[in-house]
Image (spheres, helix red, strand yellow):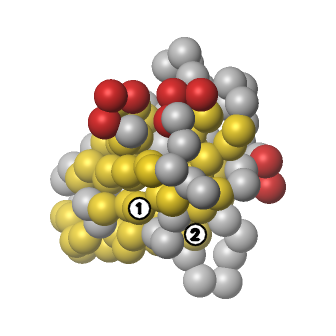
């Protein structure tokens, strides 16, 4: 059974940077697409970024394109989300998710395994 554990959340100033990590265990990591989503109370979970098995990436263009970078290290079974130029609207719980197969997707219900989430807060 696959398990995902996020880390790296915390408080960051507006304009600052933070890197989230998601460690996967229990399955061959490099055959899965990995994604990051975020959610604030009272709102639906929002797609942030995804990376496929070949390293191809897609982003939520309106929200994070040009500021966030998703990457993966298959040797470490870890996916990362580098977040730069933090904005006041970025605070949320950030979730890592796994989608079986090689195609990146922005659709949350195509991901079958989720981490517990890590809280990111932005201070002005």
Position of residue 83 relative to residue 74, above or below, is below
Count residues near mark 2 (Cα–Cα under 10 Å), then give few for <14, some for 14-19, many for 20+: some
Q: Quadrant of the N terminus?
A: bottom right
Which residue is the site of mark 1? 5
Residue at horizontal 22 percent and vertical 71 percent from the top: 11
Residue 104 as seen in the image, left or right of residue 75: right
Label 1 vs 2, first from the N-terminus: 1
Distance of label 1 from label 2 (alpha carbons)? 17 Å
Count residues near mark 1 (Cα–Cα under 10 Å), then give few for <14, some for 14-19, many for 20+: some
Provide residue 114's location: percent of width, then percent of height.
59, 61
Where residue 35 sits, quadrant-wise, is: top right
Provide residue 39's location: percent of width, then percent of height.
58, 69
The one nearer the camera, 100 or 39, is 100
SS for tag 1? strand
Look at the image and tell me whether residue 32 can be seen.
yes
Residue 15 as seen in the image, left or right of residue 70: left
Q: Residue furthest bottom?
A: 42
Where residue 101 sits, quadrant-wise, is: top right
Q: Nearer the viewer, mark 1 or mark 2?
A: 1
* Total residue callouts: 2
Provide residue 2's location: percent of width, then percent of height.
56, 54
SS for tag 2? strand
Residue 82 as seen in the image, left or right of residue 116: left
Position of residue 73 relative to residue 109, above or below, is above
Q: Which mark is residue 39?
A: 2
Where residue 113 sits, quadrant-wise, is: bottom right
Q: Quadrant of the C terminus?
A: bottom left
Residue at horizontal 24 percent and vertical 52 percent from the top: 18
Residue at horizontal 48 percent and vertical 58 percent from the top: 4
Residue at horizontal 68 percent and vertical 24 percent from the top: 102
Q: Which mark is residue 124?
A: none
Provide residue 65's location: percent of width, then percent of height.
49, 35
């Amino acid at each position: 059974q696959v398990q995902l554990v996020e880390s790296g959340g915390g408080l960051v100033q507006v304009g600052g940077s933070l890197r989230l990590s998601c460690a996967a265990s229990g399955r061959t990591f490099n055959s899965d697409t990995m994604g990051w989503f975020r959610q604030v109370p009272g709102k639906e979970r929002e797609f942030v970024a995804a990376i496929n098995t070949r390293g191809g990436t897609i982003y939520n263009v309106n929200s994070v394109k040009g500021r966030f970078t998703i990457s993966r290290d298959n040797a470490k079974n870890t996916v990362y989300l580098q977040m730069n130029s933090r904005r006041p609207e970025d605070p949320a719980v950030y979730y890592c998710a796994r989608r079986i197969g090689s195609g990146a997707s922005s659709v949350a219900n195509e991901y079958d395994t989720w981490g517990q989430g890590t809280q990111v807060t932005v201070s002005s």
